[in-house]
Image (tube, coloured by chain):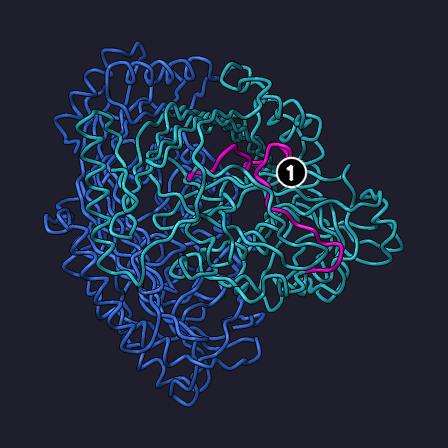
């Protein structure tokens, strides 16, 4: 089991504990705890991969799972073009834990529910709110990674997520506002302190009022305009139009049947002008980047967390890579991005924290709007879609504001924008500075077969884009 | 693998450990394998075994759930305690019902969905099938990617009022993408019985699509007559069925708010939920153990009925909407309690056309239009008009004067489902279809006029 042709990777998740609480219209709509424990064994045999996982941790079952992984690898070897080649990595023995000020599972469920009900009550105190939803989620994931190369790594990761939404149905429209952002709110690798930081109750009434006010707002016009995106929407824009296309497995065709491929073919590295000079993007899994859902000590191949420059002053400079794919870009080491959803899934290339760096000149959102003669400010994602090579995208937002002569002059409903990835990023002409920058969490990124859901991080600040197509989503309907 | 007797033993222990008024256990277990290939190589190949028990406890009007994949005494006790601890601190919910003592009306016999041959498929057999797919690719100078997966799964429910039910089934999926320099083709099939899947046939169709759509031409976006193959129909219509639950109406989040009983689709649209249909798959009971009923959701374009979990039906009967939503009764479509969504129909069967057409016949009757193999990355733009956006993918063709002319670059659509299902000119015979954006269902190919494409992408 230790020869150079046979490299098992043992991966155990122990005490993978989760708690999910949710309310809807003044009632508990979800209340559950979960635990999962098992072993996943990845082996390289006859130059091909095999993976087997089991919840049975008895010695006999683990040996059987290992044997199954080897048999699978040998079957894989029947259909191969060449042997798998791995970039070298010095094995380490290490411990790593998410910095966590308040262990979330020490906070009583009663206290959590009281907070959610307080928010729910604020939302529903606004006449016209027809549905209020809140959610709170915690996870503690403990992992031992042991490989025949000699790695022995123990990591414990905490994550917390919280958010809420107000829906308003009237006439022939359903409008919605969410906080801190949509689809589950904000998620970070933090403890309960995240809940304290977000001013949840303080913002609830405003969110309810905006959901109702949208019914009286004008429809966002269709045309080509300057747009300003809030930091949460820009985070999702990064996820879809930078984070996915830079995944080297997509580029190499390994995801062609499901998630798709990428327009970022290999010859574009260090040649393609991805964005304007103001666009600087990194994939940074290190703790110093912040408590993102893509922050860790080591990836699932035992490669330490790294910071990879992805776009440097607008130039495309890097991919997300693994030990198997690094050679394709001439790298002698993996970028450290191979992660699995859990013990029962094969690790694959995933985004870490793919973030745009804030502008270096001081610039607040209000200053950015004051500097804009005419345009639309869009906040909070409502819909997102992009083609399977990641060229053409369309995003809808929950709320828009017309900007005229440097001021927000009226609310606009159903704002949307669309474009082609590189044209869009080349149209960025201003981005706010560090004080406006937030590391957002995307907890629901789907990829792989069987599909795996992974958390990723995206730091972003509000930014301005010129000559963007607005309103196509409603064109013709 | 976990069987009904072992699960009953586990449930006995859970009951002994619990101090709650009522207790329920849901079991999910099985083994699954998936062989994945790309670049004409098997690059990922996985197998998994797991057994999960999800325990729900109830104290009067309070309930909560805890889940574990360890069935030893300590783990079960911890799960029971977690479920009880969370339940005890809930605010009382007067609408929470006592657990059911039986699953209610029996649907009748459901075809067996367990096939020994499928359960016993080996990695070597999957590799052999992949090798044949790769051979098809090589013959056409194409590159292939895809999956071949099989599984044997059980799902069961027990509660302290004596209800218990159990379901065993197998499943198999083959999906094939064929890639050429500037084009691609795709096919996917799914069945409880692997003998019904033909990897080579799927590969040959995908290869033909890749070859025939080579050098795609860009044509302008706009409204076109489209011929949607069954997988494309499945993936787009799947976005409306979560609105067919009673709770969606009570929450006022459904596009059917104020529309049940009205004709919103074309007369030729008939839709049922029917777990027992011979082409359907899945579990014949819901998250509380209620037996799924056959429900005619849409008849002649009119939304006739919704589906209901027990509690939703009770709530609807007391609501202002009760006279406007058709028959209100539990239909066996509830999700495990507690949940946000209530219920949804998950075994969709579209009614057959009185004059079904093949895709070739639809092409032959089209003066100017598009043939769409597959839709991708579909998301909801407008929840009440049910406007969806998404892309075409892996085989989009221009049709002119009754002939397939050439491949075209892929489009973005922004189309209302209400509009689309009002404009269906022709339909095929419904088949079991499988996609990536929605659950499997029984749907026909459709020819739809004025389908709204708003943008063209670069390939």
| Residue A297 lies within the magenta run | yes
* In the displayed structure image, the side of residue A227 where residue B425 appears, left or right: left
The chain shown in cyan is which? A
Q: Residue A475 falls in which quadrant of the image?
A: bottom right
Instruction: Name the residue nearer the viewer: A457 or A225.
Output: A457
Furthest-bottom residue in this view:
B401
| Residue A15 lies within the magenta run | no
Chain B drawn colour: blue
Task: Residue A340: give x, y in percent of width and height.
Answer: 41, 40
Q: Could you tell me which secondary element the residue under label 1 belongs to?
A: strand
Which quadrant is the N terminus of chain B positioned in? top left
* In the displayed structure image, the side of residue A340 where residue B283 appears, left or right: left
* Mark 1 surroundings within 10 Å by alpha-carbon count, few (fewer than 14), some (14 through 19), many (20 or more): many
Q: Which residue is mark 1?
A: A439
Q: Residue B277 falls in which quadrant of the image?
A: bottom left
* In the displayed structure image, the side of residue B282 where residue B445 appears, left or right: right
Rendered residue at 64%/31% (across/down)? A123
Q: Is residue A204 above or below residue B17?
A: below
Work out whether residue B384 can be spotted.
no
Work out whether residue A382 can be spotted.
yes
Magenta stretch, main secondary structure, is: loop
Q: Is residue B272 above or below residue A114?
A: below
Task: Residue B410: give x, y in percent of width and height.
Answer: 50, 72
Task: Residue A472: give x, y in percent of width and height.
Answer: 63, 65
Q: Chain of mark 1?
A: A
Count of marks overlaid on the render: 1
User: Which range of residues does the magenta coloring cover?
Assistant: A275-301
Rendered residue at 67%/25% (across/down)? A197
């Amino acid at each position: 089991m230790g020869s150079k042709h046979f490299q098992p990777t043992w991966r155990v998740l122990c005490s993978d504990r989760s708690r999910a609480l949710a309310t809807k219209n003044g009632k508990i709509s979800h209340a559950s705890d979960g635990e999962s424990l098992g072993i996943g064994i990845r082996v390289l045999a006859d130059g091909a991969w095999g993976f087997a996982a089991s919840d049975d941790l008895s010695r006999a079952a683990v040996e059987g799972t290992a044997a199954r992984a080897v048999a699978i690898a040998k079957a894989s070897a029947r259909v191969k073009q060449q042997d798998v080649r791995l970039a070298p990595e010095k094995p380490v023995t290490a411990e790593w834990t998410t910095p966590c000020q308040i262990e979330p599972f020490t906070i009583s469920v009663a206290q959590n529910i009281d907070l959610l009900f307080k928010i729910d009550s604020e939302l529903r105190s606004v006449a016209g709110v027809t549905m209020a939803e809140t959610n709170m989620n915690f996870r503690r994931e403990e992992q031992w990674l042991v490989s025949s190369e000699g790695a022995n790594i123990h990591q414990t990761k905490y994550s917390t997520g919280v958010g809420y939404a107000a829906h308003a149905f009237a006439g022939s429209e359903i409008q919605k506002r969410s906080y801190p952002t949509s689809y589950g709110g904000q998620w970070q690798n933090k403890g309960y302190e995240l809940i304290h930081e977000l001013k949840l109750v303080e913002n609830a009434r405003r969110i309810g009022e905006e959901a109702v006010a949208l019914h009286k707002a004008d429809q966002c016009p269709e045309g080509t305009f300057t747009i300003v995106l809030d930091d949460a929407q820009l985070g999702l824009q990064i996820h879809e139009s930078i984070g996915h296309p830079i995944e080297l497995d997509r580029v190499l065709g390994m995801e062609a049947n499901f998630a798709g491929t990428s327009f970022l073919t290999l010859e574009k590295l260090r040649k393609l002008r991805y964005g304007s000079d103001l666009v600087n993007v990194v994939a940074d899994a290190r703790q110093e980047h912040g408590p993102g859902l893509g922050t860790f000590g080591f990836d699932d191949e035992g490669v330490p967390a790294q910071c990879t420059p992805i776009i440097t002053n607008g130039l495309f400079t890097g991919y997300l890579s693994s030990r198997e794919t690094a050679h394709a870009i001439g790298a002698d080491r993996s970028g450290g991005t191979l992660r699995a959803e859990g013990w029962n899934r094969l690790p694959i290339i995933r985004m870490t924290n793919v973030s745009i760096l804030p502008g270096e000149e001081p610039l607040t959102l209000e200053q950015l709007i004051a500097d804009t003669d005419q345009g639309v400010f869009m906040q909070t994602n409502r819909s997102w879609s992009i083609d399977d090579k990641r060229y053409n995208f369309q995003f809808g937002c929950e709320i828009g504001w017309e900007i005229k002569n440097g001021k927000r002059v009226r609310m606009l409903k159903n704002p949307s924008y669309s474009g082609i990835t590189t044209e869009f990023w080349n149209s960025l002409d201003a981005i706010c500075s560090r004080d406006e920058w937030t590391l957002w969490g995307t907890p629901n990124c789907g990829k792989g077969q069987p599909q795996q859901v992974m958390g990723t991080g995206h730091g972003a600040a509000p930014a301005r884009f010129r000559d963007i197509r607005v309103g196509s989503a409603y064109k013709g309907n | 693998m976990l069987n009904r007797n072992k699960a009953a033993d586990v449930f006995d222990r859970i009951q002994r450990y619990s101090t709650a008024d009522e207790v329920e256990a849901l079991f999910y277990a099985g083994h699954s394998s998936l062989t994945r290939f790309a670049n004409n190589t098997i690059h990922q190949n996985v197998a998994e075994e797991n057994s999960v028990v999800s325990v729900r406890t109830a104290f009067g009007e309070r309930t909560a759930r805890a889940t574990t994949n360890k069935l030893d005494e300590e783990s079960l006790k911890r799960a029971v305690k977690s479920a009880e601890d969370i339940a005890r601190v809930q605010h009382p919910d007067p609408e929470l019902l006592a657990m059911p003592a039986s699953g209610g009306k029996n649907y009748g016999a459901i075809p067996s969905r367990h096939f020994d041959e499928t359960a016993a498929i080996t990695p070597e057999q999957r590799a052999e099938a992949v090798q044949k797919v790769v051979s098809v690719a090589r013959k056409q100078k194409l590159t292939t990617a895809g999956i071949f997966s099989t599984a044997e799964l059980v799902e069961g429910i027990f509660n302290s009022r004596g209800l218990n039910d159990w379901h065993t089934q197998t499943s198999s999926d083959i999906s094939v993408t064929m890639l050429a320099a500037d084009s691609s083709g795709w096919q996917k099939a799914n069945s409880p019985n692997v003998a019904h899947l033909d990897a080579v046939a799927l590969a040959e169709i995908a290869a033909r699509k890749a070859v025939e759509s080579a050098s795609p031409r860009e044509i302008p976006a706009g409204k076109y007559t489209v011929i949607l193959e069954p997988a494309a129909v499945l993936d787009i219509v799947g976005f409306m069925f979560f609105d067919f639950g009673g709770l969606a109406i009570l929450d006022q989040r459904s596009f059917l708010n104020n529309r049940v009983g009205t004709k919103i689709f074309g007369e030729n649209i008939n839709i049922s939920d029917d777990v027992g249909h011979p082409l359907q798959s899945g579990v014949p009971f819901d998250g509380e153990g209620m037996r799924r009923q056959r429900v005619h959701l849409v008849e002649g374009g009119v939304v006739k009925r919704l589906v209901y979990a027990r509690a939703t039906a009770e709530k609807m009967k007391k609501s202002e909407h009760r006279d406007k939503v058709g028959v209100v009764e539990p239909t066996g479509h509830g999700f495990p309690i507690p949940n946000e969504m209530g219920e949804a129909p998950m075994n969709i069967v579209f009614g057959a056309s009185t004059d079904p057409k093949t895709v070739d016949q639809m092409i032959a009757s089209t003066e100017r239009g598009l043939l769409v193999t597959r839709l991708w990355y579909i998301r909801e733009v407008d929840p009440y008009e049910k406007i969806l956006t998404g892309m075409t993918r892996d085989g989009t063709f221009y049709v002119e004067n009754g002939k397939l002319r050439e491949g075209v670059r892929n489009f973005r659509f922004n189309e209302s489902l209400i509009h689309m299902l009002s404009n269906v000119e022709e339909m095929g015979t419904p088949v079991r279809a499988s996609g990536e954006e929605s659950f499997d269902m029984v749907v026909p190919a459709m020819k739809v006029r004025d389908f709204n494409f708003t943008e063209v992408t670069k390939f």
